Amino acid sequence: MNIFVDWTNSHGRRELITPPLNQLILPGVTRDCIIEIVKQWEVDGVPANATSIDQSPTTPIHMHQREITMDELLEAHQDGRLHEMFGTGTACVICPVNGIQFQKTARSVINIDIPFNEEISLAKRLYTEMSKIQYDEVDSDWTISVDELLDTTKQRQPIGI
């Protein structure tokens, strides 16, 4: 499963962050889809429905692939800048993360409750957008309709031997 963090960074910029691919972070189709959808929203200037009650629904979101430290996550949580976290994968598609337990030292365990509000969830909006693409309810370069594919196949003539 790949993890995504929706937050406002320490400079006040709304971001969706996921760690870059490496030996521990493996590529995934769903991960790639989420990254591409958010990047397209960024290019098109589409607002990323607010994931915090106090945010404007026109707040743009920026997609970044970079490392995320627990200290950054803790600070964002304490400052009220952590809006949502979710995981992606083939089986679950998109699944909200409701908490993290972090052992900072041998004697201290920190529990972080991750906010989630279904009505304004970025994860829900992304899931809806992916579903619309999968069911051909919106135009996408990722899909080809079966009718178009059949028309193309009909035009091909078998080669005689």
Image (cartoon, rainbow, N blue to C red):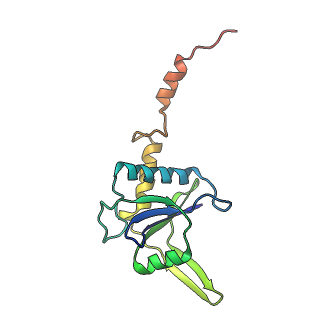
Q: Is residue 147 left or right of residue 49?
A: right
Task: Residue 64 in the image: state x and y as whole percent.
Answer: 49, 60
Task: Residue 31 in the image: state x and y as whole percent.
Answer: 54, 54
Residue furthest toward the bottom? 107
Judging depth in this view, the residue of 119 and 74 nearest the camera is: 74
Q: Is residue 130 left or right of residue 100?
A: left
Q: Where, by quadrant of the figure, is residue 83 drawn?
A: bottom left
Residue drawn at point x = 46 percent, y = 62 percent: 16
Task: Residue 119 in the image: state x and y as whole percent.
Answer: 35, 64
Q: Where, by quadrant of the figure, is residue 67 drawn?
A: bottom right
Residue drawn at point x = 45 percent, y = 42 percent: 135
Residue furthest toward the right? 161
Task: Residue 7 in the image: state x and y as whole percent.
Answer: 43, 68
Residue furthest toward the top? 161
Q: Where, by quadrant of the figure, is residue 1 drawn?
A: bottom right
- Is 73 located above or below residue 132 in the figure? below
Residue drawn at point x = 56 percent, y = 73 percent: 69
Residue drawn at point x = 53 percent, y = 78 percent: 71
- Rendered-image quadrant of the C terminus: top right
Tally of marks: 0
Judging depth in this view, the residue of 126 and 60 nearest the camera is: 60
